[in-house]
Image: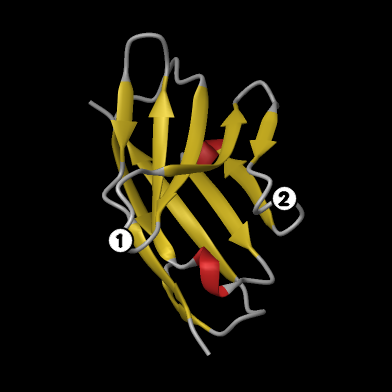
């Protein structure tokens, strides 16, 4: 089984930056796509933030385009989300997700709070 653990969240002022990490353990052979989602306070759904295909395709939500960047370190089984110019509305619990045709894994999330 694949396990995903997010880290790097915390409290940051508007305009600040954070880098989130998603560490994968177990066998991740055959994983096709890595996603970052977030759930804002009081909301019932997880919103897609970014998607990264191992083959090199990347998608970002319009709300974060130009501010957030996904990167990977395949040798270390690590995925990162660099978040710059953070806004109050970026406050959420951030989750990483890894999928292929037969598997779907989620981490437990890390809290990001943007506050002045």
Q: Residue at x 53, y 90 (%)?
A: 116
Q: Residue at x 53, y 67 (%)?
A: 89
Disc 1 versus disc 2: nearer the observer: 1
Camera-side residue: 87 or 4?
87
The quarter of the image holding the N terminus is top left
- Residue marked by disc 1: 42
Q: Quadrant of residue 15?
A: bottom right
Crowd around label 2: few <14 · some 14–19 · many ≥20 (10 Å) = few
Residue lying at the far top of the rendered structure? 101
- Residue marked by disc 2: 65
Residue lying at the far right of the rendered structure? 66
Secondary structure, mark 2, is loop
Secondary structure, mark 1, is loop
- Label 2 near label 1: C-beta < 8 Å? no
Label 1 or label 2, whichever comes before in sequence order: 1
Residue 60 pos. (x, y %):
66, 41
Camera-side residue: 19 or 23?
19
The numbered dot on residue 68 is none
Residue 27 pos. (x, y %):
33, 25
Q: Residue at x 62, y 73 (%)?
A: 17
Q: Quadrant of residue 82?
A: bottom right
How far apart in space, not on screen, are marks 1 and 2 (Cα)? 24 Å
């Amino acid at each position: 089984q694949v396990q995903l653990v997010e880290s790097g969240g915390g409290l940051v002022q508007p305009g600040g930056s954070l880098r989130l990490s998603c560490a994968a353990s177990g066998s991740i052979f055959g994983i096709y796509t890595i996603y970052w989602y977030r759930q804002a306070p009081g909301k019932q759904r997880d919103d897609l933030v970014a998607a990264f295909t191992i083959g090199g395709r990347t998608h970002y939500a319009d709300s974060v385009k130009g501010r957030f960047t996904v990167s990977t370190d395949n040798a270390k089984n690590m995925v990162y989300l660099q978040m710059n110019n953070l806004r109050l509305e970026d406050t959420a619990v951030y989750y990483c997700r890894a999928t292929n045709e037969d598997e779907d894994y989620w981490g437990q999330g890390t809290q990001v709070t943007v506050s002045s």
